[in-house]
Image: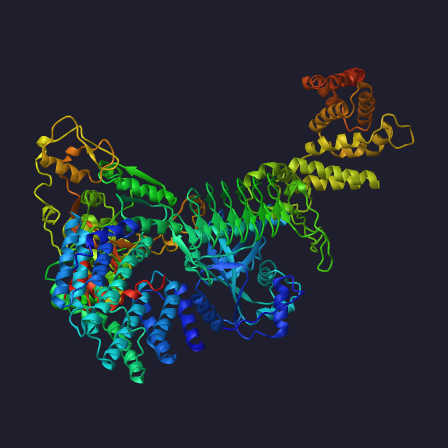
Amino acid sequence: MSKNNELVDDLVAKLKRRQLVGSSTVAQATLKLLIVVISKSNWTTCNQLLTLVKSVGQRLIQANPTELAVGNIIRRVLHVIREEFRDADVNASQNQPEFQSAPLTTSSSMYNLLGETGSTPDDSNVQYTSSLRSNIIQEIREIKDELENIYDNIKNQASLQIHSNEIIMTIGRSKTVEEFLKMAAVKRKFQVLVAESAPSYSGQEMALELSKAGVETTVIPDSAVFAVMSRVNKVILGTHAVLANGGLVAISGTHMMAAAAKHHSIPVVVCTGLYKLSPLYPYDEDSFNVTFNPDSVLGFEEGDLIEKVTVTNPYYDYVSPDFVNLFITNQGGHPPSYLYRLIVENYDPNDHTFDL
Amino acid sequence: MSEEFDVVENYKDLLRSSPELSMPVAAIQALVELIKHSKATTMSEFMLSIKDASQRLKSSVRNSISLSAGCDLFLRFVTRNSHDVADFETWKATLIVRGQSFVEKADACRYKIADLGVPFIKDGSVVLIHAHSRVVSLLLQKASENHKRFKVFVTESSQTQGGIRSAKMLRAAGIPTTIILDAAVGYVIDKVDMVLVGAEGVVENGGLINQIGSYQMAIVAKAANKPFYAVAESYKFVRLFPLNQYDLPTYNADTLSFQELNVDYEARVNEDGTIVPGSTAVSAASSTALSQTALHMKTSEDRASQGSNPLVDYTPPNYITLLFTDLGVLTPSGVSDELIKLYL
Amino acid sequence: MKIHTIVSQECMSVGDAMRELDAKQLIDTDFILVTGDVVSNMKLDRVLEEHRARRQADKSAIMTMVLKKASPLHRSRAVGDGSLFVLDQASKECLHYQPVKAFKSTRQDRRLTMNMEVFDKHPEVQIRNDLIDCQVDICSVEVPALFTENFDYQDIRADFVHGILTSDLLGKTIHFHEVSDIYAARVRSTQMYDAISKDIISRWTFPMVPDSNLQAGDCYEFRRGLVYKEKSVVLSRTSVVEDKVVIGANTQIAEMSVLSNCVIGKNCVIGKNVKIDSAYIWDNVTIKDNCIVKQCIIADNAVLEEGVTVSKGCLISFNVTIGANTTVPAYSRLTTLAEDADEDSDAELVSEPAVVGATGRGRSFKEAEGSDDSDEEIDPKNKLVNRLAYDMTALHLEDKAQEDSASEFESETSDLEEEEVNPAEELDREIAQTLERAFKDGHTVDIAALELNTLRMASNSNFHEMRKRIVPSVLKNIDVTAKAGSGKTVKEILVRWGPLIGRMIHDEADQIDGLFILQRACATLHNDFTSAKAIFAPALRYFYDEDILEEDAILEWYHDEKSNQGTEIEQKLRGSAAPMIAFLEQSDDEDSDEEDEDEDDE
């Protein structure tokens, strides 16, 4: 038990100090930790296990609230746990017809208003078996596999989306988009414009990677995005997180690009793994933003100026769902209005705000 | 037999005794009461009596979408639970128990919604609300208790004086509130950070049915790029799919008809609601129209000559940013999903 | 990671601590040395790698200092403790170190002295004043031993680094690593506390910022305008939080209060209409209505009653109470510690109403005198400069002091090389001193003359300059009222020292010049004509008799218009020479008659 605590403390410290950043790395680290915690702890009822995972989850989310992937993974796991217990429950007792249409219902739907007042799987006395434990671990490992194969699923849709002689525009460095474009380049010939995304200049790294793969790439400054947009066929973006209303938390400059695209009626496509989909809503634009060290904007050496001037360096942008046309996920392509469905399928409504 | 129990009277009593009770919940409670007092002995007789009572409730209060929604939901509830009828009496007993809990859950919806909506009120923001909605007031009061500092603009909605009631409630909770003219919504929209309205009903495509003026506010909010949030309990979801304003069941031929030829411009309404006609002679037809619209009027400036103005309007889903319900925060497209689950 | 704490009562400096470590033999590898007050977001891996690689190649590289580039006037540079580094960029070696004070009172303070041999190995060096010394050092395992060897090393920079670099014997080298994109600074004084707090609030130390909630139990949220507020803070509706504010948990701010540029701790209660600007307020502080708090630090549990104004630069310590409507004077330091309180004694606190108000509790803190055991004089201004809210405009008051110290410098007589001071004044001085010596010690004229000539040649001067000074000097010794036999009468002095003047006079031009000088000197020395004449006339006579001044020169001088210009006394002196002139002219005629007669005789 204390070993588990140590592991949790370790991950919490890394998250707080931002030694672990980026949705993918954070998600994988969280999963690894959860597998260890679940397999090494003592639990018999559903409630116990849920409480355990929730307490770990709460600590991890508080360590870095802007890394939404942590919360997403925790909620996926909670959902898996509930499902497993529900299945075990159904198999055990046959006299609850209402729950047979389980995939559609969630415990707080109107359906439940009309249904039984009583048992939810949480309270049920499901017989604990070791197979239950291994089933849960198995499911979680499947999530892990899914995470590791994210790029394959997404990039296989590339040739459907990109056609020859198209001009694609993107911003910043996204591994998903990079894989997507590289895969498309195998079969199609197209050009890519990359906005350099100051002050991190990750766009320049992206351009380098793409050109190594033989894609004709051009780097443009962020200010030129609108000017060049009229000649672009598609905008393909990566994102840090996707919110429940279809909005994006993406690198600074994305909102500008999406707005320019909307103005010119150019389709905006977002490539993202489903682990980035969060059931939270954007209470305001600053909710999930991180303001970084202003040094890359105005050097610290400018002693005179820093006394008189406040310099901010927000890392992310919030992009409202009106700007996005399509999400390409590892489970296929969906419009923003469909995301609620994906959320219902992957997360339990009781878990949306468990950390608050 | 079931005439001994007057469901409409019961309903009205319930509303009078607890003014915080919303209309649909009161209706459902009245129907549960009906079941208790029902002397039906067979299933079909029972179902018939309930349908009949539901019908009477609906017709007793005109223009209430939420009431209809509530009644329909209860009917569905009864129908759903009518399959496994082993013993009629025990089944009736179970029904009563479940019905009671249903009422309790339904009533508690409001508090769940308030909790969901509080994080959306930012510290230092300005909120625009429409007329009077119990849930909206509760949400704002809760936000204020959470030490959020915000100000409220409320539309007067002169027809129902709802704005004034809202303002009184909010000021009592220490929230700075200003009453604005309904026509001034476009004027204040740039000072506002978000718009928050209640709901009479939520239709299948995620659109909103609410007190007249909501659609206008939604259009202005969209033009000014401000978020428009609607607050609705889940029992207000109805199986309607209006294509325009006139597809609503509340619409009748009189609504905004050009029938104002015999209007009494000097008519005044007393405190108790009786109308004192002016000098001009008035025809019977328009006087009923008068009485209908004068139901809620109190001030003396009201023009009984408004004709039959609509009481509710329909807001299409593309103007609505989010819906706060007890099922969680939903995008308009998520509403249909919930409805499907219910009626499958 | 394990943490060992070593407590030592006798450690007074880094040097002592290092010696203790060496004695305990706790360290057996290279190690990182930081002070407890360092604030940084630095990742040390790169520096460590460099250091290790260097050690592999060269065992004499004993230390790597981490230095951050910043402009000289940067607010995060300690004003009082600057440093001058001489660096070689190619080999990343530090060649020389010198601490730089804000107020330089001694000669050493203003100069950089370097060993010239350094340039043999390092043809290209940089002399840098734009570096913040983070005092984060990667030290090799030999460093503690070096401290033990040199047991008077106290400070790691001023003593250790300076010493190692200026010592030829040790042959050790010290390297540096310059960083520009990370943040590191030491909280060495209240001024730095202020500057670094501002840097943290402006997020220069990201990710070490309040909303990372690194301390367990914190839950700060970041809002635009650099406002950090914990969730449980209660702000009244009319209170205004401007930008750059940090507010801790459970703090309450009442109506109409305005906060800007401040840090407020946990559980504070701030009353109505309080204005807080650029202040640092710690935990559990109560500030009642209508207070004004600016540019100060208020520690835990302090209480400010209604209407208190705290002026800039104040430090209000734990548990101090300031009575109602008091204005705390600027730069006060208030404490509740009783005076002369040892750990055992139960000394009672005597409050000073002047600073804490009639109902307050606290007194002004005065530093213990004479606690310095170093004999170097620390200019008190250097200490003041490190104070919170030290205002550079306060320099105006101390301008005069600056001038004083400049002239003090000129009166030092050490070097003869530089002559940036006025050479004339210097010569004055030299001559005066030489003559004084001569008079006092009774040198012979020869010796005195020798000395004066040497002076003349050394200062590249000429006889005129010498004359100008010697004549008045000599004449000064004359006491007009003295009696014969005292050695001070005109005659006696002239006899004694006249020849000296003679040595300064050679040709006719010199003589004429000498006469002018004599005239002026006599006139200047005495305000009345009688005394002046009492010197002038005999002097004239004497010099003529001794053939120091010849008649042609005297006549020349007399007939020159310039001798009749000048002050009244000078003119009168000229007049007093008239009889002599007459005599000379007469004898001239006689001479010429004689010559004629001679010629006639033939």
Q: Quadrant of the C terminus of chain B?
A: bottom left
Q: Quadrant of residue B126?
A: top left
**Whole-percent x, y for residue C242 in the image:** 42, 44
**Whole-percent x, y for residue C480 in the image:** 85, 25
The colour scheme is rainbow
Q: Residue A352 vs residue C280: left or right?
A: left
Q: Quadrant of the N terminus of chain B?
A: bottom left
The residue at 84%/34% (across/down) is C496
Q: Which of C70 and C437 is in front in this view?
A: C70
| C22 is higher (above) or lower (below) than C542 | below
| A249 is higher (above) or lower (below) than B140 | below
Taking the image as drawn, is residue C601 in sight? no
**Whole-percent x, y for residue C446 in the image:** 79, 40
Q: Nearer the viewer, residue C283 or B287?
A: B287
**Whole-percent x, y for residue B160 in the image:** 23, 40
The residue at 82%/26% (across/down) is C542
Q: Nearer the viewer, residue A130 or C118?
A: A130
Taking the image as drawn, is residue B141 in sight? yes
The residue at 61%/72% (across/down) is C22
| C359 is higher (above) or lower (below) than C573 | below
Q: Nearer the viewer, residue A212 or C84?
A: A212
Q: How many marks do you count on the picture? A: 0
Q: Residue B64 vs residue B258: left or right?
A: right
